[in-house]
Amino acid sequence: MTGFFNMTALFNISLAAYFCAMVCAVICLMTRRNLFDGVANGLIVAGVTIQTLYLGIRWVEAGRAPFSNMFESLVLFAWTVAVVYLLLRIRTKLPWLAAAAAALSALALAHASTFESAIRPLMPALQSNWLSFHVMTCFLGYGAFAISAVASAGYLIATRQASVAQVETRQTLETIVTQTISFGFLFLTLGILTGAVWANSAWGTYWSWDPKETWSLITWFIYAAFLHFNFMRGWRGRRAAWISIIGFISVLFTYYGVNFLLSGLHSYAKG
Amino acid sequence: MSDSVEAKEPVAKPAWGNPVTRVLGSLAFALTVVLLLALACIAGTLIPQGSQVEVYLARPGGHQVLGVLSALGLTRVFYSWWFVGLLFALAASLMVCTGRRYQAIKRATGAARFRVIGSFITHVSLLLVLAGGVVRVIWGQKGAIQFREGEAVSSAESSDGPMVLPFSLRLTKFELEYHKKTTGAKEAPVDMILVQWAEKNLIAHFPVELNVEHPVVPADAPAGASPAFRVKVLRYVADFALDGATGDVKSRSDVPNNPAVQVCVVGSGSTNTQWVFARFPDFGSSDSSIAAMPLKFRFMAVPPEEMGMRGGDIKAFKSTVEVIEKGAVVSTRTIAVNSPFSWGGYTFYQTSYNPDDLAWSALQVVRDPGIPIVYAGFVLMMTGLTLVFCVGPWLGDQRRRTGELS
């Protein structure tokens, strides 16, 4: 299949689509012309479509889910960020969120290009049907948390201005933060649970305090605290935004920091 | 710039309870415990856990730092009394909160009722997961088995002493599989000599090159031992034949119809030469001098794309075992990573192998009666969260729309 499709070209086209989407969204913000917002969203849809094709072909070529190393997980992260943004876009129109989501996806793909992209055979522990389910659910969570962090940062900026438009924007952002964290928490939980079931099948223990597991739990604690404050104390606003940003820093450490700074059962992920 | 403080789904404070349950059921208490657990988890990942003393001593401050870390239980955070205490505090908080949510179900109406039910189920699920962990700690067992092909064991080694099994487990076969390289153009096969120890264990391999000596270490030699044998290929013939008149070896043609190599082994105070045939690997094995040799040779052409077969990426390692009860084999199964085998309440997991001794295998045996409880907790957790984050909001949306239309 790779003979028919040039995999490098597909990768580069999706990266270019996200980058151009970011540029168009920024132009929309500067000129306030809706045309650029439409083009930006069209480019994100194109980027997601091409990336889906890329992931599908790689899946067929590898004979397994393409989620097993740093390159593949960064490609998946770019895809989930864009997909979560598009799901939000159905209800909410915020050009700067489009710019931020496209920038995140482009950055993830650009960073992925610095890693080895060759398809490598899987080590025995990764040869499981749980691989696709566990990684996909975790990354849908990560994608949602990335959008929530971006929206939270936007909220913190918007609260510095007091115009009516900014008040509306703030209310929209509060809703986005709550919705994306709810979505992300659901999928992160599913990711942790599927990982536990998989670990029990592979090693005979569903929880071994491996650094990746432990940091996933820390992340889960932070977002659980956010949801309790949000639902029970009605916390919105700046405090909620800060918790959301702290949560995403924890996500980044869980995903990235643990791979490179701490060794454990997920050490294969750094390659 | 004030924050909104309107409660979305307030859970009514209980009319019942005493000061202790009021504290345990408070959000402040629950989140304090969660914060302390999170800090402990961070410490547990940043400070080496359960390492040798030398690891701690090698760091700045050596002895003093180790003394402080040990006193605070920070070298084994997740098994320290205070961490377990925090988990029990979390469980106590969850129990009280679960009771409060149960009461709130009766009061909730409409779509909010689904969210409260979901929240109740989620809290129950967390209690089940913690309960499953307690059951594992109290009644669970974990041990390690190491055996060689043909050996049977009826106990495993565990940190609490021998873990006796109510049956025996015999390793009948161990297999190590390698990934074949799938990329790149096919190249011509390379003639290789594979050296085995006692028919089974691959201990060396090298390409056929005349008069190049290869040191070989026996499989049962201790690590770092000097080579006990030196092996070299004296001669190669493409189409082996014996001269009828002289009895000498000759090649009928250059076409590899019957390729063979003459191998010379020096070691154990003697020198031995033998012919090894690619197409007839067992030819000559009945010869008493060859049969007595612990080293066995295989001569084969291996395509370069399959060179990974030896020393390449591991695809799988599997142990075929027999369960023996009252002297009779009652079951035969193959255990691999991600494919455990359960028998009599015990589950066996493939954990390790020895690349230098392919008749050796290591398994982990686990008996964990808490697993059904933990898995029930997992199912309930997803059910509860789905009610909270999907069903509840969706029904709320539906009812709002219906209200707007009417």
Image (cartoon, rainbow, N blue to C red):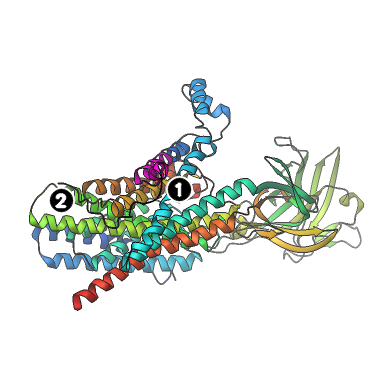
Magenta-colored segment: predominant secondary structure = helix
Q: Secondary structure at mark 1?
A: helix
Indicate the position of residue A162 as horizontal and vertical percent values: 9, 50
Q: Residue at x 34, y 66 (%)?
A: B392
Left or right: residue A135 compared with residue B210: left
Indicate the position of residue B372 as horizontal and vertical percent values: 58, 59
Indicate the position of residue A148 as horizontal and vertical percent values: 28, 54
Q: What is the spatial separation of the Cα atoms under label 1 and label 2, in whole angstroms? A: 37 Å
Q: Residue at x 72, y 52 (%)?
A: B194
The answer to which quarter of the image holds residue B51 is: top right
Part of the protein shown in magenta: B16-39
Residue B210, above or below A15: above
The answer to which quarter of the image holds residue B114 is: bottom left
Q: Residue at x 34, y 43 (%)?
A: B28
Question: What is the quadrant of the N terminus of chain A in the image?
Answer: bottom left
- Residue flagged by tag 2: what amino acid is it? Ala
The residue lying toward the viewer, choosing from B59 and A117, is B59
**Residue at the spot of label 2:** A158
Indicate the position of residue B324 as horizontal and vertical percent values: 80, 58
**Residue at the spot of label 1:** A270
Q: Is residue B19 magenta?
A: yes
The answer to whether any part of residue A164 appears in the image is yes
- Residue flagged by tag 1: what amino acid is it? Lys
| Earlier-in-chain disc, 1 versus 2 | 2
Do tag 1 and tag 2 residues touch (Cβ < 8 Å)?
A: no
Q: Residue at x 15, y 57 (%)?
A: A169
The residue lying toward the viewer, choosing from A164 and B263, is A164
